[in-house]
Amino acid sequence: MKLLYTHPNSIVVAQARSSVELAGIACTIRNEYAAGAIGELAPIDTWPELWVVHEADYESARLAIERAHAEIQEADWQCGRCTRFSPDTFDLCWNCGRERPTK
Ligand SMILES: [Zn+2]
């Protein structure tokens, strides 16, 4: 087992898992239910984590996520204060709570 990916939003982690599974790579999510309700920020040690089952698959799994991310990235927006990216469905920065900049 090797930690592959982590993100405060379990939906994003679930999407990453789908991408990895589509590539035919065995993986599993830990801490899936550790995060609080939407809008409640979990400390980083309880972020949902995506683990690749066989370490030998790590590199191809990472590439699968990178490819998927390149497609998703456009929908993300960047926080003007802390420069983190938040998913399109967020109105506030997941990291510092700043409001989404208007386009
Ligand atoms: Zn921020």
Image: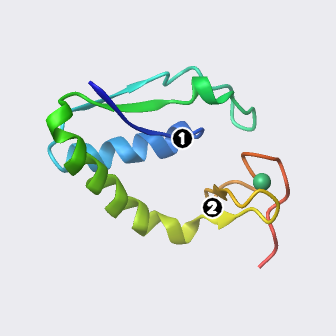
Q: Nearer the viewer, residue 18 or 5?
A: 5
- Tag of residue 88: 2
10 Å crowding of disc 2: few (<14), some (14-19), many (20+): some
Ligand 1 image position (quadrant): bottom right
Determine the residue positioned at 58% across, 20% down. Answer: 34
Q: Amino acid at mark 2?
A: Asp
- Tag of residue 7: 1
Outermost bottom residue: 103
Number of numbered markers = 2
- Display colour scheme: rainbow
- Tag of residue 74: none
Question: Which quadrant of the rendered structure holds the N terminus?
Answer: top left
Q: CA distance from mark 2 to mark 1?
A: 15 Å
In the rendered view, does 62 fall on the left or right side of 7? Answer: left
Q: Position of residue 45 (x, y in %)?
A: 59, 24
Asked whether the viewer can see residue 102, the reply is yes
Q: Secondary structure at mark 2?
A: loop
Q: Amino acid at mark 1?
A: His
Q: Position of residue 52 (x, y in %)?
A: 27, 33
Q: Nearer the viewer, mark 2 or mark 1?
A: 1
Q: Position of residue 57 (x, y in %)?
A: 17, 40
Q: Position of residue 24 (x, y in %)?
A: 14, 44
Determine the residue positioned at 38% across, 46% down. Answer: 16
